[in-house]
Amino acid sequence: MGRLRAQRHIVSPDLDTPLLTPVKDPTDPTIEQAYKMTRVYLMKKETPPKKTGEIMAKEIATSEKQRNALGFHQVGKANEIPLYVSTEGANALESANRMVEPKLKLATHQILLSALSSDSSLRGKFNENGTDSNFWIAGTGRDVNHLFREGEKSWMTKGTILCTFDQEGNLRRGKGNSIETTVRVWKGPDDNPLLFYVLRDGYARAGGARFVLGAWDKPDFVANLVVGVPQSN
């Protein structure tokens, strides 16, 4: 037997004790084997277990129950994004605050226009009682005021324009090919929150637009709905 050169310690900070391997030569295969064992151990320890479909389904069901208990119910989907509505009215600040506990956020006009224009059954749920619905949404006046040209009047002086939108709900000037693809936009304060209307048939036909949108100058106005989507979307 040849003389041992030294005892080599292969230490992992995640192991309780070092691996002690006496070897004759640095190329001894026991070193490579020890490293492999350590690497496998660490990979097993650091890799979190994957959630099964059953666990994910239970988490979704729990979230749904919590939202329902807080007054939010899913009325449909907007491009596969669940849309939740509460019929308890709220002003702008209250609407935003009510999103926190059920882990929702205010919907954007893009999500809403894309969904409501393409799904008549979903749109009908906002006018079930033959009334107009209104609710605060994400964004401020800056998000729509750029559509107005210099010199065009603000809402305070009854200034509005008709707009249409693409499949993603992005607005552009000009009337749509039907009331379902037309939005009446009013110009309000840049920093004020946006209010969104879904008009009943009579008003929509009279005004030439199913939807009305703009920065309201009275954020304390109590809208008749609160609408949100999951925070993860």
Image (cartoon, grey):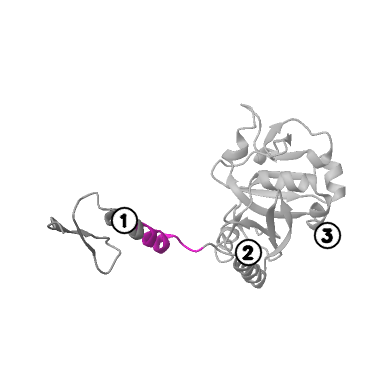
For the point 66% across and 49% down, the residue is 195
Residue 17: give x, y in percent of width and height.
25, 68
Q: Which residues are magenta?
A: 39-49
Query: How far is the residue under mark 3 from the one under mark 1?
Result: 68 Å
Q: SS at mark 2?
A: helix
Q: Which residue is mark 3?
A: 128
* Three-letter code for the amino acid on which mark 1 is drawn: Tyr
Q: Is residue 180 left or right of residue 223?
A: right
For the point 35% across and 56% down, the residue is 36
Total number of numbered discs in the rendering: 3
* Three-letter code for the amino acid on which mark 3 is drawn: Glu
Residue 158, labelled with which disc?
Answer: none
Q: Which residue is mark 1?
A: 35
For the point 56% across and 66% down, the residue is 101
Are circles 2 and 3 on residues that touch, CB within 8 Å?
Answer: no
Quadrant occupied by the N terminus: bottom left
Q: Nearer the viewer, residue 86 or 194?
A: 86
Does 139 lie within the magenta span? no
Dot placed on the residue nearer the N-terminal end, 3 or 1: 1
Dot placed on the residue nearer the N-terminal end, 2 or 1: 1
Q: Residues within 10 Å of mark 1 (few under 14, many from 20)?
A: some
Q: Residues within 10 Å of mark 3 (few under 14, many from 20)?
A: few
Q: Is residue 127 visible?
A: yes
* Three-letter code for the amino acid on which mark 2 is drawn: Gly
Residue 103: give x, y in percent of width and height.
57, 62
Q: Is residue 220 visible?
A: no
Q: Residues within 10 Å of mark 2 (few under 14, many from 20)?
A: few
Query: How far is the residue under mark 2 from the one under mark 3?
Result: 36 Å
